[in-house]
């Protein structure tokens, strides 16, 4: 270990850094900001049974405790990227961190499931002002492309680790404190990240910003489409699949999606330039990311209930049960990078998609065969996740025109959050429909456990087919080369630049 003291980063007037070590303060701050917004996706998942008993919530309400955050987070990521290009990236990030920390303190006044869902939705809005900007600012810290890719890989590992560490950290905390502390801790973390960003990340120059108007209608239509689609699943269980609320939700989601596409096509300053999807790498990477996030969110939501209810484990033990995911996430880097270097992005992602499909099919069989089988499936699933998520994230951003790197980061994050919302909604809805809509207090009966296993088998079997088709379909659109070299033929207009 070197004993040479680390030098502070250059002052904010310096535009770029020459090494990751020189940029350790801003890089650590951006990683911390990204970590807290990703860990908040799953931090409360381990506490869902406790929250359900404390607030008298059913499985549908608990589904929205996690889904509300992902819904607003994913729906507003592109809008946040647009705001950052107009108001300043560092300024929007600092505002998002401050609001995120302040809102987290409001959990002390929560007394009902509805209030918690509303708070989670508000936290998702604040987090949306952080995620794409942290990734965009990482690119802006360096001029050297190799350093950018290394820094991006660090960010991806940190974000994915935060997502899977949520249940472990939450379960450990629940052994000593009330579940409200899982949100309260966000405040000091956000404060530390704010200090690091102010110290090491240079402010945007006026000439780097754009004066294009915000695409408010596009943002509203995207949130409406995703929200109504997810609500339709819940409404189908509560009111029936042929009921007026369910049919109205489905129709509204379709109309909002069509209106979004039509609006983006004719807008002079669209929130999402649909021409970007002419590039197969951009299109395929986004689709594959949706598939991986459906798998991860659906499995984590289902297994948290599985460990604590079917097995009767404590929150700490249930959190520790996720260690195979965490360990594999860290150790699978040489494997995923080796696949990409040897076979190229397309083949490597197809291998990852196969791992996802096989692991989900294995879970469909293994949920009633003990933890060892489940752990083996978790390892295989994580290899697939690590491979597809990392390759697609780097490929997507690298495939964008030079003036679109941050919109690429926002698109990557949006695809993941859409998948998270869908995965949680599908598994939560299937369990509610096939097992129970109201979680019982205390231990489950043998009959209810058997019914839960049956519901899990159907849910994971369905996910195996859906995720396999989505992830493989996206992978087929990627390039065979080891590095992304193709770009859209049409250069993006400067007034729409988001880098």
Image (spheres, rainbow, N blue to C red):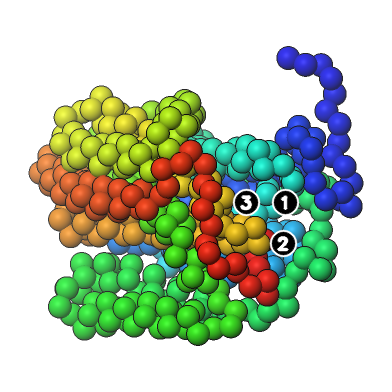
The image quadrant that residue 167 belongs to is top left
Measuring from the top left, give residue 349's x and y in whole percent. 37, 41
Q: Position of residue 448 (x, y in %)?
A: 14, 46
- Does the image show residue 305? no
Q: Secondary structure at mark 3?
A: helix
Foreground: 212 or 170? 212
Q: Is residue 232 above or below residue 393?
A: below
Q: Quadrant of the N terminus?
A: top right
Q: Which one is in front in this view, the residue at disc 1 or the one at disc 2?
A: 1
* Mark positioned earlier in the residue sequence (1 or 2): 2
The residue where tag 2 is placed is 89
Residue marked by disc 3 = 135
Q: Residues within 10 Å of mark 1 (few under 14, many from 20)?
A: some
2 or 3: tag closer to the N-terminus: 2
Q: Helix or strand or loop: what does disc 2 sit on? A: helix
| Label 1 close to label 2 by CB (< 8 Å) | yes
* Residue 194 can be seen, yes or no: yes
Q: Nearer the viewer, residue 268 or 301?
A: 268
Whether pointer 2 and pointer 3 mark residues with C-beta atoms closer than 8 Å, the reply is no
Q: Quadrant of the C terminus?
A: bottom right
User: Which percent across, then down, holds residue 463?
Assistant: 24, 50
Residue located 47% across and 71% down the image = 274
- Quadrant location of residue 340? top left
Query: How far is mark 1 from mark 2, CA to CA?
Result: 10 Å
- SS under mark 1: helix
Q: CA distance from mark 2 to mark 3?
A: 11 Å
Q: Mark number for residue 140?
A: 1
**Mark 2 crowdedness (10 Å alpha carbons): few <14, some 14-19, many ≥20:** many
């Amino acid at each position: 270990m070197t004993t040479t003291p680390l030098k502070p980063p250059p002052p904010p007037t310096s535009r770029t850094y020459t090494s990751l070590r020189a940029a350790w303060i801003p890089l650590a701050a951006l990683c911390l900001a990204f970590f807290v917004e990703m860990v908040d996706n799953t931090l409360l998942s381990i506490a869902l049974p406790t929250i359900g008993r404390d607030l008298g919530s059913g499985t549908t309400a608990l589904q929205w405790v996690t889904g509300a955050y992902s819904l607003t987070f994913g729906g507003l990521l592109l809008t946040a990227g647009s705001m950052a290009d107009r108001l300043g990236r560092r300024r929007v990030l600092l505002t998002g961190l401050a609001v995120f920390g302040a809102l987290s303190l409001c959990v002390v006044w929560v007394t009902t499931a509805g209030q918690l869902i509303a708070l989670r939705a508000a936290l998702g809005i604040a987090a949306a002002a952080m995620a794409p900007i942290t990734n965009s600012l990482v690119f802006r810290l360096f001029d050297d492309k190799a350093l950018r890719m290394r820094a991006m890989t660090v960010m991806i590992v940190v974000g994915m680790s935060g997502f899977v560490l949520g249940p472990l950290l939450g379960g450990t905390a629940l052994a000593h404190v009330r579940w409200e502390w899982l949100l309260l801790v966000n405040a000091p973390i956000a404060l530390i990240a704010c200090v690091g960003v102010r110290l090491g990340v240079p402010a945007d120059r006026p000439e780097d910003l754009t004066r294009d108007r915000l695409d408010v209608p596009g943002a509203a239509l995207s949130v409406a489409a995703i929200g109504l689609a997810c609500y339709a699943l819940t409404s189908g269980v509560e009111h029936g699949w042929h009921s007026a609320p369910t049919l109205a939700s489905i129709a509204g989601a379709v109309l909002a999606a069509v209106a979004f596409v039509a609006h983006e096509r004719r807008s002079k300053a669209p929130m999402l330039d649909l021409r970007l999807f002419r590039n197969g790498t951009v299109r395929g990477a986004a689709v594959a990311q949706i598939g991986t996030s459906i798998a991860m969110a659906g499995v984590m939501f289902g297994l948290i209930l599985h460990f604590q209810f079917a097995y009767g484990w404590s929150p700490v033990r249930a959190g520790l049960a996720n260690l195979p995911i965490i360990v594999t996430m860290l150790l699978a880097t040489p494997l995923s990078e080796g696949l990409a270097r040897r076979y190229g992005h397309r083949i490597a992602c197809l291998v990852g998609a196969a791992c996802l499909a096989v692991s989900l099919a294995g879970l469909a069989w293994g949920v009633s065969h003990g933890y060892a089988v489940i752990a083996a499936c978790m390892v295989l699933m994580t290899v697939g996740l690590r491979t597809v998520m990392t390759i697609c994230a780097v490929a997507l951003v690298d495939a964008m025109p030079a003036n679109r790197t941050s919109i690429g980061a926002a698109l990557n994050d949006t695809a993941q959050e859409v998948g998270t919302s869908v995965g949680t909604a599908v598994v939560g809805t299937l369990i509610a429909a096939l097992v129970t809509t109201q979680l019982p207090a205390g231990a489950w009966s043998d009959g209810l456990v058997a019914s839960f296993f049956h519901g899990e088998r159907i849910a994971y079997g369905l996910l195996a087919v859906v995720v396999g088709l989505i992830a493989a379909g996206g992978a087929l659109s990627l390039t065979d080369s080891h590095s992304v070299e193709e770009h859209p033929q049409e250069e993006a207009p400067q007034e729409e630049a988001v880098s």
